[in-house]
Image (spheres, rainbow, N blue to C red):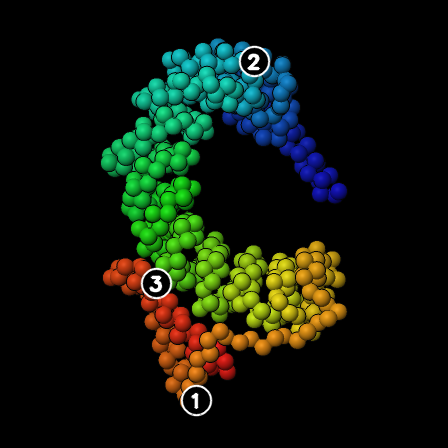
Amino acid sequence: MGAELKEKKDQQEEVERCLTLIQSRNPRDRSFAAKCLGGLKTRPDILIELLKDPNGFVRSAAAEALGRSVELPAPEVVSHLLALIDDPNNYVCAAAVNSLGLLGAIQVADQVEACLDDEHPIVVQAAILALARLDPHRIEARLVEFIQSEAYLIHLAAVRVCGWLAQDACSGFILQALQDFIKADARQDLKLPKLYIEALARLKVKEAIPTLVDIAEHEIGLRSVAVEALVEMNAEEAAAILSPLLSDPSNALRRNLIEMMLQADYQSALPLVRPLLKDKAIAVRETALAAISKWGDKVSVDDVREIAFSDPSPFVRPQAVIALTRLLGQEVLLDLVDLSEDLNLYVRRAVAQCLAEVGTLTPEGKAALLRLAHDPETADYALEALQAHDLDALKPLPVQTAEIVAPVPKDLSGVPELLNALEAWQGALPTLQRNFHLDELAEVDRALSTLILYLRGALNGGQE
């Protein structure tokens, strides 16, 4: 309740400051005050008064703010905005048209449609965007015309609306525009090509996949958005081509690429994804965890365990707990017991949920679950585990037996060195991707994983 009162007090103080600024002789102060009032969604009466300001920038700011400060029905506001369509300042007119669109004032659709033929591009741009919100059918027939306009603002608005309305008729023009931009090698403004890529992704233009792959490989500044588009389009064929970029310096690019590998279930990328569990970027580690978990990579157990116990991000650790449980199954119980008293609330909640996936509870496991069930902060998360286990008939852990029991060497003196060598070999696989096909590396990785897991098990007195 105290926080709510403080918020109201702070808002009132901000409104009072705006009311003071409105009295300023400096038009920048008055414009700033109008924008602030719009952001606060208050005092439309003051904004209406500012529509009469002699300075065009102030009128424009007030008109724009009105579109964000009220909701329909607001006949007085709509009436004043409609009157501004004839304002001698084109920016004021455009702001009024845009606000009418934001308000959803369908009753003025005819007047907004008439602005499509205005001689000033900024007014036409506002009319295109507003009409797409008010009555999309009125704009659809002219989108191909506007998308071919040489006026930057009109072209930009048309591309955006094509994406909004999923207009397939425009897809060919957008793809050609993107290809022309790349050929022109113009890098001053990346807003337009990013918009092309986003629109192509929304339109699911499969013909754009080769172009997007090329952009992801070579075009600095556009690669991440191209990979995002390929992920959105479920372009599985791009996964193998782009896998070498998993070592790229861009955090966003690495994260998006792992998501693509996951969508395509491209497990051959495992040798390249595994090292990303130690990536400096939180989002990359999170996505790598998801991949390791989905692909059941038991070689990564130690790394996942380290993340679960000591990752610097409090939000990555719970995800590692879940991944560790999926990788180890019953064998995760000791880790869950240790983590059940962790200081991180989210880790304890993850433990409570994961205990439901453990087949049989030891006395220590039972005690951990009951602690979590009696803790108000984790009780709700322990419900499924409580229901999953018959705590009145608790049985000891069954002996884990491998399906195929391989002989354990009697002399294990050389095993640690061999294990270190195999782990180093596996860790170096990503550096070999330029000389070998990724499927070949993946096959070597699988063989190494089998040996590594067996030797780790031998050193621990039994197989993992």
Contact (CB < 8 A) between labels 2 and 3?
no
The residue singled out by tag 1 in the image is: 410
Contact (CB < 8 A) between labels 1 and 3?
no
Q: How far apart, in angstroms, are the residues tagged by discs 1 and 3?
A: 31 Å
Picture quarter containing residue 73?
A: top right
The residue singled out by tag 2 in the image is: 107
Q: Position of residue 399 (x, y in %)?
A: 58, 77
Q: How far apart, in angstroms, are the residues tagged by discs 1 and 2?
A: 88 Å
**Image disc number at residue 366:** none
Question: Is residue 405 left or right of 73 when viewed as pictured?
Answer: left
Element type where label 3 sits in the image: helix
Q: Within 10 angstroms of label 2, few (less than 14), some, or many (20 or more) residues?
A: few
Q: Position of residue 299 (x, y in %)?
A: 44, 68
Question: Is residue 219 left or right of 297 when viewed as pictured?
Answer: left
Given the image, on which type of amino acid does mark 1 rest? Lys
Q: Position of residue 128 (x, y in %)?
A: 44, 20
- Considering only vertical position in the picture, is 183 above or below 293? above
Q: In terms of depth relative to the viewer, which is nearer, 277 or 97?
A: 277
* Residue 452 appears anywhere in the view: yes
Mark 1 or 2 closer to N-term?
A: 2
Residue in the image at 41% along x and 26% along y: 167
Quarter of the image with the N terminus is: top right
Mark 1 or 3 closer to N-term?
A: 1
Q: In terms of depth relative to the viewer, which is nearer, 83 or 335?
A: 335
Please state which of the two labelled residues, at mark 2 or mark 3, is closer to the viewer. 3
Question: Is residue 74 left or right of 421 when viewed as pictured?
Answer: right
Residue in the image at 41% along x and 82% along y: 416
The residue singled out by tag 3 in the image is: 442
Mark 2 or 3 closer to N-term?
A: 2
Given the image, on which type of amino acid does mark 3 rest? Ala
